[in-house]
Amino acid sequence: MTPDLSVSIAGIRLKNPVIAASGTFGYGVEFEDVVHLDRLGGFVVKGLSREPMIGNPPPRLFETAAGMLNSIGLQNVGARAFIEEKLPKLREIKGAVIIANVFGYTREDYEKTIEILNEGEGITAYELNVSCPNTQHGGIQFGSDPRLLDEVVRSSRRFSPRPLIVKLSPNVTSIGQMAHIAQEAGADAISLVNTFVAMSIDVKTRKPRIANVTAGLSGPAIKPIAVRMVYEASKSVQIPVMGMGGISTAADAIEFMLAGASAVQVGTANYWDPRATEKIVGELSRWCAEHEVPRIAELTGALQP
Ligand SMILES: Cc1cc2nc3c(=O)[nH]c(=O)nc-3n(C[C@H](O)[C@H](O)[C@H](O)COP(=O)(O)O)c2cc1C
């Protein structure tokens, strides 16, 4: 049996549910030599802002038990340079699903960034990053305040002719409430989780491991919390959910799908294995064949009581 791995999310048909997560896969082009980009469900490019950003000072990465802290601070080339310098190369990859991750300090920033990106041909969808924990303003502030979330999603919706995926922060009390707000404000899908606000200290020097002091925790360490949040969010909305947080194997991906995800994203795993996404696609096909699952889409929300 050759299982059907295709899934549909926000009106987009993906050949499989595996998507590379923003910030862990560059602009896609950097992975061209190691991953067949057209064999992935898709990939999300690094968060893009209206103007280029240099990010936070180093050290910005630190490995923790089964995880990683990062405080990159949204370093990126800016939306304009992305469409002029990166997108033409990405367009050459036939069948690639390119999702642009959008970041802003203000609501107007989100609108302007989307306006610039609208000029770029070949972008499949936008993922609105309202959940970055590593900037002084913007990002997570939108994702952790119900009123601000409603406003930024509503206005971005007006500016976006493309499917809009809203990436939620796990640093909230009720993920179900935030998911519902994003849906009501016009999101076509939601994705979660972004990183958890965290901190680590070098006890010898008594200094924080990360220059910005706090940072975002990702990787296998966060997976059980992420699965729980995907489960709660998916019960609160009718729109599709993309799940992520510590996925590095096909079984991890399936766990998120059973919890309610229609597709998954793979982030930190790309750091120790740049081929992780493509490997998971192969593993998923074998897993479905072995477990007699003809269509992977039927696993979404199929958690047994
Ligand atoms: C180094 C690094 C940079 C990231 N940059 C972004 C970003 O620009 N935009 C965004 O929405 N998420 C960003 N993220 C969050 C990831 O996309 C993902 O939500 C998170 O890491 C959880 O998934 P994982 O455990 O598989 O890494 C970043 C994560 C890491 C580790």
Image (tube, helix red, strand yellow):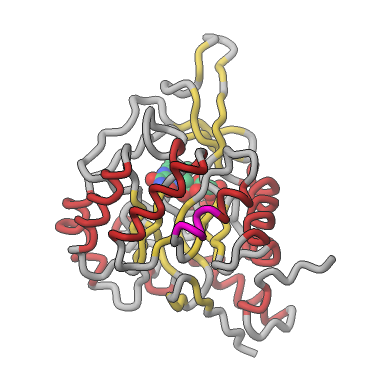
Which image quadrant: the N terminus? Answer: bottom right
Q: Quadrant of the rendered structure where residue 159 is?
A: bottom left
In the rendered view, tell whether residue 105 sits above or below residue 38.
above
**Please, which residue is most extreme toward the left here?**
84
Q: Quadrant of the rendered structure where residue 90 is?
A: bottom left
173 sits left or right of 49 in the view: right
179 sits left or right of 232 in the view: left
Q: Nearer the viewer, residue 159 or 12?
A: 159
Q: Is residue 82 a member of the stretch shown in magenta?
A: no
Q: Position of residue 103 (x, y in %)?
A: 34, 45
266 sits left or right of 46 in the view: right
Residue at 64% x, 49% y is 226
Q: For residue 23, say whether it is visible.
A: no
Q: Position of residue 295 (x, y in %)?
A: 63, 83
Q: Give the range drawn in magenta.
A: 181-185
Q: Which of 53 and 26 is in front in this view?
A: 53
Q: Nearer the viewer, residue 164 or 44?
A: 164
Q: For residue 22, say whether it is visible.
A: yes
Q: Where is residue 264 in the image (x, y as percent from the top left)?
A: 55, 62
Which image quadrant: the C terminus? Answer: bottom right
Q: Quadrant of the rendered structure where residue 172 is?
A: top right
In the rendered view, tell whether residue 196 sits above or below residue 188.
above
Residue at 21% x, 54% y is 82
Q: Where is residue 134 in the image (x, y as percent from the top left)?
A: 42, 33
Residue at 56% x, 73% y is 282
